[in-house]
Image (cartoon, helix red, strand yellow):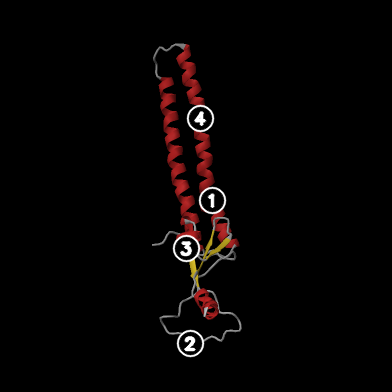
Amino acid sequence: MKIMILLVVVMMLPIYAGGQEIYRWIDEKGTTHFADDFNLVPEKYRHQIQKRRPSLPPDTPAKPTEPTEQTKVAPERKDLLGRGEEWWRAKMKEWTDKLQAAQKNYELAQENLKQKEKELAEPKIRPDSVKRKLKAEIKELEEKVKERERERDEAKNMVEKVLPKEAEDYQADPAWLKPKE
């Protein structure tokens, strides 16, 4: 009797496994990952997962079915590395957000520099030690402005040149780089 139960269970396993979903996602490096448990998908990639059911083994006859209007779905477009619209939009949003933050940081650093320069230029009688301290602060702020400018320029270059060029090289739809309306 135990052998009979074991035999039934073993015969049912392929049916159960065939119903299992497989989750597919692509990380920021372009590496494709697969998992059969949704909880194994890292949270930051769950928005882009693609669910698939395993295909039947080659010797299993498939039921011929006629696709209906409801089941006909256009395949999602991908670039040469298998990345779709969501990946490109997320990448562009990441760099656009970096550009906005870098622009704000640059403007703030510039404003702080102008305030210190104005403070130094005020016609107050100050000891030399205070003037030296202000000059040192100004020099430090000038370096900060240059660093913020480099960050802004890097983000601007990514948004305006690098990502559009990568999209072209990997044959991604250029519209994927524009915000959805």
Image position of 33 with respect to 130: above or below? below
Q: Which residue is mark 3?
A: 38
Q: In front here: 138 or 2? A: 2
Which of marks 4 and 1 precedes in the sequence?
A: 4
Instruction: Look at discs 3 and 2 and give the one toward the viewer.
Output: 3
- Marks 3 and 2 sit apart, C-alpha to C-alpha, by 29 Å
x and y percentages locating residue 52 in the rendered image: 50, 71
Q: Secondary structure at mark 3?
A: helix
Q: Nearer the viewer, mark 2 or mark 1?
A: 2
Q: In the image, is 57 to the left or to the right of 134?
A: right
Sequence-wise, which precedes: disc 3 or disc 1?
Answer: 3
In the rendered image, the vertical position of residue 124 relative to residue 179, given as above or below: above
Q: Is residue 157 above or below residue 61?
A: above
Front in this rendered view, residue 181 or 87: 87
Q: Outermost residue toward the front?
A: 1
Q: Amino acid at mark 1?
A: Met
User: CA–CA distance between discs 4 and 2?
Assistant: 70 Å
Task: Compare marks 3 and 2 and give the one earlier in the sequence.
Answer: 3
Please report contact status of discs 4 and 2: CB closer than 8 Å, yes or no. Answer: no
Residue under circle 2? 65
Mark 3 neighbour class, 10 Å CA radius: few under 14, some 14 to 19, many 20 or more: some
Q: Residue at x 59, y 59 (%)?
A: 31
Asked which secondary structure carries label 1, the reply is: helix
Q: Are marks 2 and 1 in contact (CB under 8 Å)?
A: no
Type of residue at label 2?
Thr
In front here: 106 or 89?
A: 89
- Distance of label 3 from label 1 (alpha carbons): 33 Å
Q: CA distance from mark 1 to mark 4?
A: 24 Å
- In the image: residue 82, left or right of residue 97: right
Residue 158: mark = 1
Sequence-first disc among 2 and 1: 2
